[in-house]
Amino acid sequence: MKSLSSVSFLLLCTVVFHLFSSASAGLMRGRSLAAETKKFCIPKPGASNDELLRNIDTACNKGADCSPIDTGGACAQPSDTMSYASFAMNSYFRAKGSVESACDFEGTGQITSNDPSHGQCKYP
């Protein structure tokens, strides 16, 4: 019985060692143990109304789920072009795998770590 206890103890120590090794390797590569910072794509300040409308059109016609900004949708309010563009651009960004190039929108998009969700409107 004593040898079985020793084997169990060694197995437990091996598992614990590997868990701590994996965690410290992630920290050394600059990653935290918590989820990585989520990124969002929003319009740059100063983007014109025409640019924002073009971004909405592009995003909603090329893979973004824009149903939340439709009338009655969770993100239909506030009813302004900047809010609609923000949601559409981020939805497109997500649909394209959150790669930075999917947030360019001819130089009018920017990536932020600040979650633009508000009220019932939750950004993906």
Image (cartoon, rainbow, N blue to C red):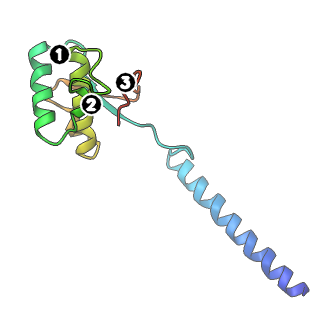
**N-term-proximal mark, 3 vs 2:** 2
Tag 1 and tag 3, C-beta contact below 8 Å = no
Q: Which tag is nearer the camera, tag 3 or tag 2?
A: 2
State the mark number for residue 68. Answer: 2
What is the crowding at mark 2: few (fewer than 14 residues within 10 Å), some, or many (at least 20)? some
The three-letter amino acid code for the residue at tag 3 is Pro
Q: Residue, x 33% and y 32% (percent of image)?
A: 40
**N-term-proximal mark, 1 vs 2:** 1
Query: According to the image, label 1 marks what residue?
Result: 47
The three-letter amino acid code for the residue at tag 2 is Pro
The three-letter amino acid code for the residue at tag 1 is Ala
Tell me the distance, in whole angstroms, between the alpha carbons under discs 1 and 3. 17 Å
What is the total number of numbered labels drawn onto the structure image?
3
Task: From this view, report whether residue 21 is shown above or below residue 43.
Answer: below
Closer-to-camera residue (112/80): 80
Residue placed farthest to the front in the image? 72
Circle 2 sits in a helix, a strand or a loop, which is it? helix
The quadrant the N terminus occupies is bottom right
Task: From this view, report whether residue 79 is shown above or below residue 97.
Answer: above
Tell me the distance, in whole angstroms, between the alpha carbons under discs 1 and 2. 22 Å
Tag 1 and tag 2, C-beta contact below 8 Å = no
State the mark number for residue 116. Answer: 3
Q: Quadrant of residue 120?
A: top left
Residue 99 percent location from the top left of the image = 26, 43
Q: Residue, x 47% and y 42% (percent of image)?
A: 36
Residue 74 percent location from the top left of the image = 32, 27
